[in-house]
Image (cartoon, coloured by chain):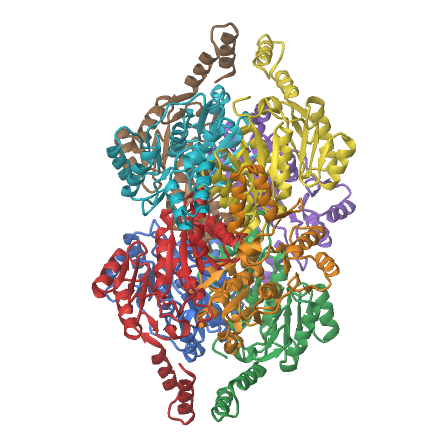
Chain colours: A green, B blue, C orange, D red, E yellow, F cyan, G purple, H brown
Amino acid sequence: MKESDIKSILNRMNSGELNIDEAEKLVEEHYFGNLGFANVDHHRSRRQGFPEVIFGQNKTTVQIVRIAEEIVKHESIVLATRLSQDSLDAMSARFPDGERNDIARTFVVGMPEPDIELTHGTILIVSAGTSDLPVAEEAVVTARAMKNDVRSLYDVGVAGIHRLLARRNIIMSASCIIVVAGMEGALASVVGGLVQVPVIACPTSVGYGASFQGLAALLTMLNSCASGISVVNIDNGFGAGYAAALINRTGKI
Amino acid sequence: MKESDIKSILNRMNSGELNIDEAEKLVEEHYFGNLGFANVDHHRSRRQGFPEVIFGQNKTTVQIVRIAEEIVKHESIVLATRLSQDSLDAMSARFPDGERNDIARTFVVGMPEPDIELTHGTILIVSAGTSDLPVAEEAVVTARAMKNDVRSLYDVGVAGIHRLLARRNIIMSASCIIVVAGMEGALASVVGGLVQVPVIACPTSVGYGASFQGLAALLTMLNSCASGISVVNIDNGFGAGYAAALINRTGKI
Amino acid sequence: MKESDIKSILNRMNSGELNIDEAEKLVEEHYFGNLGFANVDHHRSRRQGFPEVIFGQNKTTVQIVRIAEEIVKHESIVLATRLSQDSLDAMSARFPDGERNDIARTFVVGMPEPDIELTHGTILIVSAGTSDLPVAEEAVVTARAMKNDVRSLYDVGVAGIHRLLARRNIIMSASCIIVVAGMEGALASVVGGLVQVPVIACPTSVGYGASFQGLAALLTMLNSCASGISVVNIDNGFGAGYAAALINRTGKI
Amino acid sequence: MKESDIKSILNRMNSGELNIDEAEKLVEEHYFGNLGFANVDHHRSRRQGFPEVIFGQNKTTVQIVRIAEEIVKHESIVLATRLSQDSLDAMSARFPDGERNDIARTFVVGMPEPDIELTHGTILIVSAGTSDLPVAEEAVVTARAMKNDVRSLYDVGVAGIHRLLARRNIIMSASCIIVVAGMEGALASVVGGLVQVPVIACPTSVGYGASFQGLAALLTMLNSCASGISVVNIDNGFGAGYAAALINRTGKI
Amino acid sequence: MKESDIKSILNRMNSGELNIDEAEKLVEEHYFGNLGFANVDHHRSRRQGFPEVIFGQNKTTVQIVRIAEEIVKHESIVLATRLSQDSLDAMSARFPDGERNDIARTFVVGMPEPDIELTHGTILIVSAGTSDLPVAEEAVVTARAMKNDVRSLYDVGVAGIHRLLARRNIIMSASCIIVVAGMEGALASVVGGLVQVPVIACPTSVGYGASFQGLAALLTMLNSCASGISVVNIDNGFGAGYAAALINRTGKI
Amino acid sequence: MKESDIKSILNRMNSGELNIDEAEKLVEEHYFGNLGFANVDHHRSRRQGFPEVIFGQNKTTVQIVRIAEEIVKHESIVLATRLSQDSLDAMSARFPDGERNDIARTFVVGMPEPDIELTHGTILIVSAGTSDLPVAEEAVVTARAMKNDVRSLYDVGVAGIHRLLARRNIIMSASCIIVVAGMEGALASVVGGLVQVPVIACPTSVGYGASFQGLAALLTMLNSCASGISVVNIDNGFGAGYAAALINRTGKI
Amino acid sequence: MKESDIKSILNRMNSGELNIDEAEKLVEEHYFGNLGFANVDHHRSRRQGFPEVIFGQNKTTVQIVRIAEEIVKHESIVLATRLSQDSLDAMSARFPDGERNDIARTFVVGMPEPDIELTHGTILIVSAGTSDLPVAEEAVVTARAMKNDVRSLYDVGVAGIHRLLARRNIIMSASCIIVVAGMEGALASVVGGLVQVPVIACPTSVGYGASFQGLAALLTMLNSCASGISVVNIDNGFGAGYAAALINRTGKI
Amino acid sequence: MKESDIKSILNRMNSGELNIDEAEKLVEEHYFGNLGFANVDHHRSRRQGFPEVIFGQNKTTVQIVRIAEEIVKHESIVLATRLSQDSLDAMSARFPDGERNDIARTFVVGMPEPDIELTHGTILIVSAGTSDLPVAEEAVVTARAMKNDVRSLYDVGVAGIHRLLARRNIIMSASCIIVVAGMEGALASVVGGLVQVPVIACPTSVGYGASFQGLAALLTMLNSCASGISVVNIDNGFGAGYAAALINRTGKI
């Protein structure tokens, strides 16, 4: 709500036109699309620069489609993540023009073009192995949905470091880098040591035994001796993409 | 080394002027200031935009002063962190114009003015309690050493959320925010939910019992449901400040 | 057993009418309904103010129905939790007047009306996200089964704190509050900082990666810097509801 | 701030008398006593029923006394916990009428009498061993500071359960019980199984080896099969006392 | 091998009749029944007082039956644990006189009668809840297979401690007690505090949330303040029964 | 209390001679020696076969001596463990005939001779390295205090297994064995595989790095593939000695 | 790339024949076989002495066959591990001459004969129980694929240590030993104490309860008091075999 | 003992010249130097290729010197590790020709020259930072004590990977490499990816916060995606040096 809206409501309260319950209801209607099982947060795009994202895990296909329909009324873009095969199919049927990504398990209605005015440059997503692809792609889709130009460099893990060094040019030209890696997650330190742009490290649960479902990679990244690295939750490709997108528009919003 | 330097060395190798050992030695001299106990990385300021930082923990006072003297030969700034009382005194004596911060346990030779051209705006450091001050101040010093305009908002923990909301104006005007919090670390989620700029969350080891020396705050921050938050190691004020500084110059270097 | 019963048995022992084995058997019959696989604790409603609750996990449908039949002989209410679809169906068939809740996975025979004499006011259940609903509903059912007036406020997570603040009136009017939240669980601290009534925090296993099946939320809540919060086990909606109900009758029983 | 105060400020903003910065400053002065190193939260006693408590750990003696002096200006009671020997001495010197407890490491200025109108009955603190005393006493002092009648039952651990059962009368007559125990923490389950009033379980770090500084007792208490138990952080006697005090005035504030 | 056997082999080596490989082969044949996939340890009943036990987990039905056939050639008893439904059926078919226990998932060929000469008295198995039955029954079967008189007392968890105290006579008359409990495992401490015979505590993985698959009960039991309790692995009913059986023949073998 | 005592008190209650408070007081006096800071449990020697043991950790020297004086009034033996140098000195001064062990940090007043009638045979304490000595000696003292004949075999760790095998005769002749080992704790499995008597495994906190203060040894012992091993807490030499002593009198009390 | 290749490319850059992008492309083609979803690392056999290995977990059958086809173009051997039944079938069909191992879940195209010139002697794989077979066999296949003579000794766990000691001759004759063990993993220490050759310890996830999926065995092995043992990840038979193969050619490549 | 010695003793037993106790004593004297507090293992140098090493932690200076004096009687070399300043001084005084290393905290009597016949080549020790020096130096001393030619490369952590790559020649020429690193430990993966010789990874406890005293580095190394790496305990420089020395003589002993 803008300051003028708040003042208007307060003045109406002041004048006795509204009691406190009516005022509250006005605020509520302004902010939320209440679907019974969910309060869709219409205010978020204004508060945070991007509408509420549908986190598909633990939601039914029906709930996901309903929330998407509610958001699409007020926003030009809908991003849904962690969708089951079933939910992907239902979204494709309901929004035939949407962009579906089966590896990332995402669906986007109204995917925008990159906006060069809004962003400082290219976001690069680097991943260590083929098994890290679903997380890496979730980051790609998220960053693109937030109007970024995105490039990716896959399967360049640290065990064959020449694969990485051979692509140094690509790495050097990004304005922000996301490193996605499971197992020991050392790739984040190596990339972080090469560049002077912000690096978001995203551990994945890829591995076995003492990887403890991503804990090893997470600890590696948190303890990185390369400066300027910050870390998101295990398998949180969305969070990495979102943080990179905010970084890539620093000072512009 | 610039591409021309490498080519020159390679040509001299090609022509037989240098053998491979001599070539290696030339590279080594170019890059490192070898002190016996440490390879000072002179190349880092070009590679990463800031000279090597002296991490004082586990180093003797003599070593710290010697490394500082080595760096100061090539760079306009020296930043030393995690200094003991002893090392702080020795640095003050050796570099009387340096800036000493006893709470942050840092010392800076050649602290620069904020550079508005290089940066997108103000970095804000928000902390939950008075016990978090040393970590918060380490972040402040680091970000300032990297030429940022820095503001701080201390003791605004989430248990009295009105203290935070009352300063919403300050929060909204930053281009990048660092949240420093121990105990349950919930402050990061609350701040992250209010803004649309990048948020770096820095857990601290403040707490007792089931805080497990900062693990509770770390997990809270990694699992934050607020989008766009990324996390650094427990008590890593330096890392938070460094990451924020890189973010605040995105697209400028 | 009342004091008079014990004295009576002891007197009969004293007089030689009963030997110690016969006395023991009398006590046993008084207290337990022995079904072979379970000792139904008939004494509990007198000792603890509520009859034994059927914890359905790891019990077969047949066992659950049998125990319910045993309890219903002595008590006006039966509460069963953690029921499988199968057990819910069997209970519905056996007790057609019972109240079935498929989200909470509970079944209640003889659900009472709220008892205003017995209780101090309304119990409010606040939850962070739609995925926390099963746990929140288990708390609702439990508190209602113990004769409380219960209200709920769902999907008001801390990432959009205005959703919570907009309902401050509802929050302020409760006599006891249960906060149900997964992921980082910060909601408990925020609610705890707003009110002066007892707050029971119930972490859920909702989340992924470093949420470690609810451990992150549990630690957050245990370390909360808001005073007056106490915590129950992960996903223990029943325990939260039960504790809140005891609190809401403090000094009345 | 009362609703009328807010309206008054908003009207002055509306009329142009105040700009937004001046309004913010007014709010700030109303709520906080800013000491530079701390924002004393004057609003808390109205919001939470008790003034801000001084958590002495990690604070200097000077800071503690200063904060106490600030609080005492606005409130009739000051409670300080986790005080060092040094801070206890300084507080005694500064507030000669205060109540000092060397076992609990607490200091109270203005300790009140129990208030029978405000509370439902007696709070009982039960502890397992002599080593748990400091935590138990912190709970006692806190509950008394909040105007409760408090009784205690010490050294009645579960290994000699007859010691506990012999005091069943005392246990049965409390309106709320706090159980303080380290090592395996089983006492909470036993007490919880005997009574029908709210039980707050407070694990302590007493033990060695696989007690893991209180983790064992914490897990025991969280998993208690006795209904109605809720748990606070390890060694958090203050939190247990505070929660019990809120419970003991349920429906009265 | 008896000392005389070893000497005989060594003398034959000494005299040149056997070379070292032939000697080794003789030893091997004496000790093992080599089935290719397993070395059945025929020596164990002499060395440890009971033949090798078949641990069914991770073994195929065919392997289990084959090993049982091999053991039965040399021993009067075969005990197999952790059998799948499939393996139970196959064992029943192959050894129609064997004793099958579907709750314990065990099968015994040649179950003996209790041997009063060999043992000091009755082994009592106490369990906390119905869900602990499979583990408790595994202990019962194992102790019986080792010729003990076994009694059991089920569903006497600590939340209703009168259920336990009512059976004090049974508890007092055992010569060794096994306590099987999940969740918080406090039952071991309570029983251990009542008796002066050895108590074996066996934690189970029954529980949820912060029980962490039996870790909570394990830690509780290891930290028990009752003296004389020792602990076996989570869900290790076999180990508890075996240890109790050894204890119950102390000084007799 | 004997059954006749209870009946007598109840009869006096019945006849009105005693009210419930007076009856309670009588029971209390019978059972406890109340020192203010501790309830000395006079009933324990009858209930558990050994008087209450003074656990010195976290107790002051004054408290320890006072409790010892209280126990010595009713019992022929006092055992104190985990004594500081200071407490050892004070006990030596107060009880000049007591037996002091500086390695075990124990003090015994009235150390008895081994009682061959009461026990089945010799208890053997085996330890892996010299650093495990304090724990091993605590077990020795405890078992001796409970009238056992005790032998020890030190520094026979598994890395030089011939040291152990060379003493096979000693091992084979014990009626119960305690294995004390830190680091990886494998000694328990090796000894357990050699014998058919009960083995108590006691992990120690000796080690570094991934020994995690004894956790590695504890887990090794809990997972031992040798049957009949049960485990006590890390560094709990007292518990191991106590459990072994109970085992060594199985069927005799 | 050989030094001459690099110089050639650099000279062509120097002379203007190649720009930096063309040079990079040449390098890339030389090193990688880009399949879109994977960068097959053709350089690895030269850099590391063995071509890239296909880690089948998380890869589709189609991907696995495609990568194998790509490798087989340049190399004389292909090793694939962690294959599903499905992938094993597909590889058998595509490479009918390959060697398939259903226990190890491996497939090898072009399995070589042992190379006595390249290796120092025999690699011995020792395993504790039948359940450890899949991991042990993965190590066998890997070491054989790297041209080693391999022997194995299975089911010789430490609970029946005579089984191990009886095979001392075999153990003493190996040039490098791999010990594969789950549960408590003590076998590594016993073997390590017997020999003076390098021992690679490989923990397995075999066990239950407090084995925590192999963590117990891992910690045991890391803390082994036997010198010269080094450890690989839980269930990492491939890594153990690979490390042993490198060791067995020390100084030869 | 050689086979002939054993046969001789057995023949004397056979002929009745020795009884079993006398035979045992002979064996004992042969193998151990019993100092009361320690069994010095004289057999180890024959069994394991190196005499028993004195692990100084938890031993008194007197014990250390006494054990050294005992070993020196039978062996040409004594290696003592983890010595306090005090023990270092005492050893220097007692063995003036010994080699003392204050960083490694080691002392060697009779340090040998490298033996080119016995070893395959040079052992290289690579470390990440100056704080890792004590552990790296412990490895150096150990490997040298076992007659290896040792080189070291310090302070070449992965954050400035060019420092490492610049020394590729040194790395490529080693026959076995030890990587010592704390914090995130990524250096092991990078080195492991460059070479085809065995790599021993040794994590150190250097770091803070989420390094958890070396756990992060340990997990990183165990999960390394570079093949052929095996790992020793945190801070176990001795173990790393010992394993490398065994590797470097593979097939030679």
Q: Where residue G244 appears, x then y in whole percent?
A: 57, 37
Q: Please tell me which residue lies in front, G23 or B112.
A: B112
The image quarter in which residue A130 lies: bottom right
Q: Please tell me which residue lies in front, D107 or H79.
A: D107
Residue plotted at (60% across, 25% down): G163
On screen, residue D251 versus residue A134, left or right, reads left
**D166 is higher (above) or lower (below) than D173:** above
Q: Where residue C116 appears, x then y in whole percent?
A: 54, 71
Is residue H42 visible to us here?
Answer: yes
**E38 is higher (above) or lower (below) than C111:** above
**D104 is higher (above) or lower (below) than G132:** below
Q: Where residue G161 appears, x then y in whole percent?
A: 56, 27
Q: Where residue B60 appears, x then y in whole percent?
A: 30, 51
The image quarter in which residue C69 lies: bottom right
Q: Please tell me which residue lies in front, F82 or G95.
A: F82
Q: Please tell me which residue lies in front, E176 or H38.
A: E176
Is residue B46 visible to us here?
Answer: no
Q: How many numbered marks are there? A: 0
